[in-house]
Amino acid sequence: MPRGVDRAGVRRLLDEGAQVVEVLPAEEYREDHLPGAVNIPLRHIDPEGVSDLDKGRPVIVYCWDTA
């Protein structure tokens, strides 16, 4: 179930082996991304697009917005 998490929660999840997915467009991901993050652009969040994720590990989804 999706939920928001604060910085301490992100650190805890990472320490427990969470996967980081950036949903930025591929071009933006290539310019800069979080260390260890995989890129699955938002439009590819579907069963096929996420098939390489480990379903037994938590997933942290990240996107940024300048607005």
Image (spheres, rainbow, N blue to C red):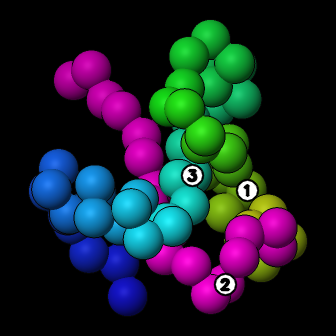
Report x, y in % for residue 16. Answer: 42, 71
3D distance between C-alphas at marks 1 and 2: 17 Å
Identified by mark 1, the residue type is His
Q: Is residue 28 visible?
A: yes
Residue 23 appearing in the image: no
Residue at the spot of label 2: 55
Please tell me whether residue 8 is drawn above or below residue 37 in the rendered image.
below
Q: State the image coordinates of residue 53 (x, y, percent, origin top left).
A: 72, 69
Answer with left or right where residue 4 lies relative to residue 59: left
Residue that protrudes farthest toward the front in the picture: 15
Q: Residues within 10 Å of mark 2 (few under 14, many from 20)?
A: few
In-front residue for pair 51/54: 54
Q: Residues within 10 Å of mark 1 (few under 14, many from 20)?
A: few
The picture quadrant where one finds residue 31 is: top right
Q: Secondary structure at mark 3?
A: strand
- Which of marks 3 and 2 precedes in the sequence? 3
Residue type at mark 3: give it: Val
* Label ID, residue 21: 3
If the image is split into quadrants, where does the C terminus sit? top left
In the image, the segment drawn in magenta is 51-67
38 left or right, relative to 4? right
Establish if 44 lies above or below 46.
above
Front-most of 63 and 32? 32
Disc 1 designates what residue? 44
- Residue 56: within the magenta? yes
Q: Three-letter amino acid code at disc 2?
A: Lys
Name the residue at 15% across, 56% down: 8
Q: Quadrant of residue 65?
A: top left
